[in-house]
Amino acid sequence: MRGGENGAVKLVVALGGNALEDKALPPTAQSQRLVVGRTAERLARLSAAGYELAIVHGNGPQVGRILLASETAAAVTPPMPFDVCGAMSQGYIGYHIQQGLRRALHALGRDIPVVTVVTQVAVDRDDPAFRRPTKPIGPFYSKEEADALSAEKGYVMREDAGRGWRRVVPSPRPRRIVEIGTLRTLWSTTITVACGGGGVPVVEEEDGSLTGVDAVIDKDLAAMELAVEMHADVLMILTEVEAVSLHFGTPEQRPLARATPAELEEYARQGHFPPGSMLPKVQAAADFVRSAPGRRAVITSLDRCLDALEGRCGTWVSAP
């Protein structure tokens, strides 16, 4: 695979939830450190293979737990607003990735700095998503608890598939990565962990200042925006499956080895990709490929990330 001026392929990697948590383990910081250590070994092999990379991760359960802890302790200490909770999750998840990846790189004889940049991502204050909150965060509540939270705090609460009621927040599209200049400066010498949880969503005020908002940016779309602004060669979206499939979970299931953006969009219109899981991944892949000639995206599993880059598995998305 050919890269940029120095021959190295510039790669932005979006990590799925399975890269940070194992459902068989308790949701503790110690368990996350263990899982991240395994993830870091795979990422280190990408670096050892010559790829230059930046890493984006999700934060769904982590930021929900931070928010819950903050609200539970409200009688003792003032609760933190949601944008602050998002920044906190970037810090502690990034800290675990830094430690795990430095350890894994050292084991391969590679002395490469790893740094987390608490990243702000500008969104449009007029994005339609602000009028239609859809992203669930935090724990489940009864109908009575949800009504009380809505009345007391102004939260938008929605019933979630018969499991209870949850708070929902807007999920606007990313428009600009505020710290992109710093990330570009670090790129040639450092592996950066950026846009964690999609980045802290902010809006730009008339005086040029930034204000955090209660929202969640989709992690895969944030990774796409980072890859675009970083002029990356490949966007790699890692998940629990080796490839995107049509008719997933049915006897007619069929993996896609290759697809164009237009083909993915047609499959999406046909309803092949669930909105809460595969749909944002194929949207991000299609948007990145369309952003400039020669750009490609691949969707595959964490376990087979290097195999995918070597063409042995995964769903590759490229222009016709």
Image: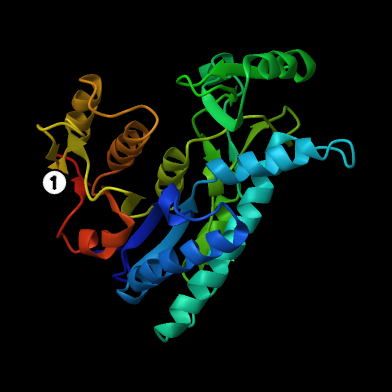
Q: Amino acid at mark 1?
A: Ala
Q: Residue 48's spot in the image, x, y percent?
A: 34, 76
Q: Residue 124's spot in the image, x, y percent?
A: 57, 26
User: To which quarter of the image does residue 120 belong?
Assistant: top right
Q: Secondary structure at mark 1?
A: loop
Task: Please state, as top left, top right, bottom left or bottom right, where the N terminus lies in the image.
Answer: bottom left
Relative depth, front residue between 26 and 112: 26
Question: What kind of colouring is applied to the model shown?
Answer: rainbow
For this orientation, the residue located farthest to the bottom is 109
Relative depth, front residue between 227 and 62: 62
Does residue 313 sit above or below 228 in this rendering? Answer: below
Residue at 49% from the left image edge and 56% from the top image edge: 25
Residue at 40% from the left image edge and 71% from the top image edge: 41
Does residue 241 sit above or below 279 in this rendering? Answer: below
Residue 14 placement, left or right of 28: left
- Categorize mark 1 by other alpha carbons within 10 Å: few (<14), some (14-19), many (20+): some
Residue 111 placement, left or right of 74: left
Q: Is residue 116 visible?
A: no
Task: Please state, as top left, top right, bottom left or bottom right, where the C terminus lies in the image.
Answer: top left
Residue 64 placement, left or right of 262: right
Q: Residue 288's spot in the image, x, y percent?
A: 33, 41
Does residue 32 sit above or below 161 in this rendering? Answer: below
Residue at 25% from the left image edge and 25% from the top image edge: 268
Instruction: Give the residue pinned by disc 1.
Output: 257
Q: Is residue 95 visible?
A: yes
Residue 133 placement, left or right of 146: left
